[in-house]
Image: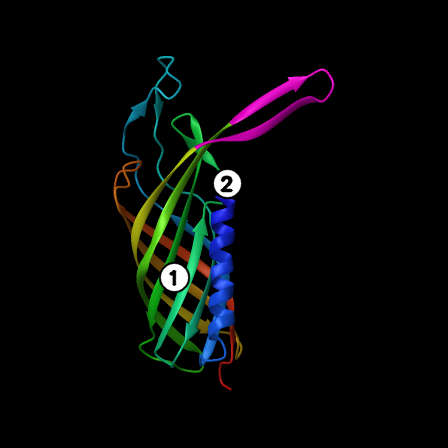
Amino acid sequence: MRLQRQAVCVSLGLLLTAGLSMAQSANVYVGVATATDDSNGLSYDTFGDGTLFGTPKLSGVFPKIGASLMWSPHLGVGADVTWRASRTDYAGLLYRPTFYNFDAIWAPISTKRFEPEIHAGVGGMRLGFSYKSTNCDPFGGCQTTDQAVENSSHFQWHLAAAARIYVTDHVFVRPGIDYHYVHNLFQFASNNVPEYSMSVGYSFGRGQ
C-alpha cells in the first residue's frame, strides 16, 4: 500500500515536471477527506474457529494529495490519491482503503479569485488487509507488528466537482465532492462511494 501511494506521488511529480513547460498553469494541493459506504451486513468466520465477525461501514479521515495541469483557462488533466489515515477493523482483520485516479478537467469559468473544476476519469481502489501479531522472546522482549494478509484491487470510474478559491494570486482553498464508482466492491454495500474533501494548494504560472 505504501509503495502504491509512492507510485502515485511519483506520477503526480512526473505529470508536473513533464507538462509544466507546455501548460499555462499547474496546481498542487493537499487536504483531508472522508469517503463513505454502508456495511454489506455480512459476518465471517475469519479465523475458522466458529467466531463470527461483522463487516463495518466505510468511513474515517482520509489524507488527500493531488495535482493538475491546465493547458488553457478551461481544459487540463490531473490526478490525485486519497487513503484512510489509519487502519481499522474489518471482520476481525485490519484494513486500509486507497483511491487513486487520473482525470480530464474542464473549468467552465476562470476569474481572478474563483475557478470551478469538473473532473472525469478512471483509476482504482485498493483494500489492504492485515492483522497485528505480537512476538516475545527473553532477549528482545515483545514486539507488535502488522502482518499483511492480502489485498483486493478494483477498477473505478471517477467524477468530481471542486473549486479553487484564491486567497492570494497563487494560494487557494479547494472544497470538493468526488464520486467513485468502484466495480465489484463486494466488501461494502454499494459500488457507489461519495467523498467530501477540503484542501489547500498553490498555483504555478497563474497570471503570468
Q: Nearer the viewer, mark 1 or mark 2?
A: 2
- Tag 2: Cα neighbours inside 10 Å, few (<14), some, or many (≥20)? few
Q: Is residue 17 left or right of residue 93?
A: right
Mark 1, residue position: 176
**What is the x, y in percent for residue 149?**
45, 30
**What is the x, y in percent for residue 130?**
47, 31
- Which element carries disc 2, helix, strand or loop? loop
Please say whether residue 133 is one of the residues in the magenta stretch.
yes
User: What residue sits 49% from the left and 54% below the top?
Assistant: 7
- Tag 1: Cα neighbours inside 10 Å, few (<14), some, or many (≥20)? some
Q: Give the amino acid type for the residue marked by disc 2 in the picture.
A: Ser
Quadrant in the picture for residue 112:
bottom left
Which region of the structure is painted magenta? 132-149
Mark 2, residue position: 86
CA gap, disc 1 and disc 2? 22 Å
**What is the x, y in percent for residue 183?**
26, 46
Q: What is the chief secondary structure element of the magenta stretch?
A: strand
Q: Give the amino acid type for the residue marked by disc 1 in the picture.
A: Gly
Furthest residue toward bottom:
208
User: What residue sits 46% from the left and 45% below the top?
Assistant: 84
User: What residue sits 52% from the left and 80% below the top?
Assistant: 169
- Which element carries disc 1, helix, strand or loop? strand
User: Is residue 71 or residue 115 the one in the foreground?
Assistant: 71
Q: Is residue 172 visible?
A: no
